[in-house]
Image: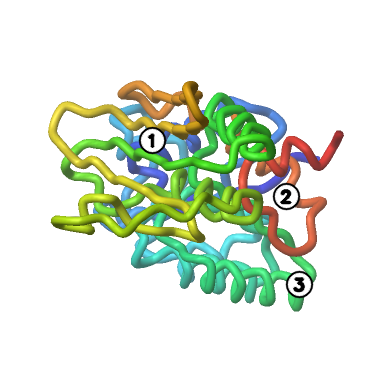
């Protein structure tokens, strides 16, 4: 039996790419879509294609009138937590690809998921190569205590740092204990912001692609682990489909695609 999926953000950049992939994959059945700008339209028409019989709902509550197994959220930082809690309250599993949640949000989501007996897989980045870069950085952190993160994105990205780098910083904070450095003179804010004890710098300028660097330093040597994404949403599709397939076997929260990959090892 295929997994029935509702995609919130199905007419957007990443959510649309995921929803189109679901339509073409017989492991899944796309049963609902949420997109406020195209509410009431046929999803295929909203994509500029032939009608496919899937209506676009204006809210997740409206879409949940159709029986489903999993909700996928690729919407907005201001909406995602409410969507996750609503889906769990309706007895569905959830895959979260939207940035903007913090550690306290994830703690509340995990408690609700355990209470509901449902699973949540959340990742700041569902790219398989980004998951590998995160895994490599965490491995390097076991041996190299000094690390800083640089987060790159275009000027119109609404969250800083990105969910990818926030997730990595918090994971690194559980591994590294960085060296205490002298207090910065001049303008201390130029040294970046501490997240879980890891210094993070967020660059937001026109012309930049999504990328991050984990910079490790040691006397007379350094290691740079860098990940770059292109201009399309294609890199995030395979990881999201993998999460949809696995989340129905999860109870509680798995945060990070790398942890989902490691769960089967």
| Residue 75, horizontal then vertical, whole percent | 38, 54
Helix, strand or loop at label 1? It is helix
- In this view, the mark in front (2 or 1): 2
Foreground: 56 or 105? Answer: 105
Quadrant assignment for the C terminus: top right
- Reading the image, the residue beneath label 3 is 114
Distance between the Cα atoms at labels 3 and 2? 13 Å
Mark 3 or mark 2, earlier in chain: 3
Q: Quadrant of residue 242?
A: top right
Residue 253 at what x, y percent from top left?
69, 60
Which residue has dot 1 on it?
44
Mark closer to the observer (1, 3):
3
Q: Residues within 10 Å of mark 3 (few under 14, many from 20)?
A: some
In the displayed structure image, the side of residue 119 where residue 233 appears, left or right: left
- Residue 72 location (% of width, % of height): 54, 51
Q: Residue at label 2?
A: 247
Farthest right residue in view: 265
**Alpha-carbon neighbours of circle 1 within 10 Å: few (<14), some, or many (≥20)?**
some
**Residue 236: mark:** none
The residue under the point 21% across, 36% down is 154
* For marks 1 and 3 on the same chain, the one whose residue lies earlier in the sequence: 1
Q: Secondary structure at mark 3?
A: helix
Image quarter in which the N terminus is found: top right
Give residue 191's position: percent from left, percent from top: 27, 50
């Amino acid at each position: 039996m295929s997994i029935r999926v509702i995609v919130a953000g199905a007419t957007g950049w990443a959510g649309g790419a995921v929803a189109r992939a679901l339509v073409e994959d017989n492991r899944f059945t796309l049963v609902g879509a949420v997109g406020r700008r195209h509410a009431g339209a046929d999803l295929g028409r909203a994509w500029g294609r032939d009608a496919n019989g899937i209506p676009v709902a204006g809210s997740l509550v409206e879409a949940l009138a159709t029986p489903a197994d999993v909700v996928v959220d690729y919407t907005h930082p201001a909406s995602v937590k409410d969507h996750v809690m609503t889906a769990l309250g309706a007895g569905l599993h959830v895959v979260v690809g939207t940035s903007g949640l913090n550690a306290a949000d994830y703690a509340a989501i995990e408690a609700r998921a355990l209470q509901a007996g449902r699973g949540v897989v959340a990742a700041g980045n569902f790219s398989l190569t980004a998951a590998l870069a995160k895994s490599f950085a965490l491995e390097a952190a076991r041996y190299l205590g000094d690390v800083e993160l640089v987060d790159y994105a275009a000027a119109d990205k609404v969250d800083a740092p990105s969910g990818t780098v926030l997730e990595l910083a918090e994971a690194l904070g559980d591994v590294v204990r960085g060296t205490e450095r002298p207090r910065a003179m001049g303008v201390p804010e130029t040294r970046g912001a501490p997240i879980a004890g890891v210094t993070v710098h967020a660059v937001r300028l026109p012309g930049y692609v999504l990328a991050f660097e984990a910079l490790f330093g040691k006397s007379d040597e350094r290691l740079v682990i860098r990940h770059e994404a292109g201009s399309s949403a294609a890199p995030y599709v395979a990881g999201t489909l993998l999460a949809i397939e696995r989340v129905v076997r999860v109870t509680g929260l798995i945060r990070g695609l790398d942890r989902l990959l490691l769960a089967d090892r």
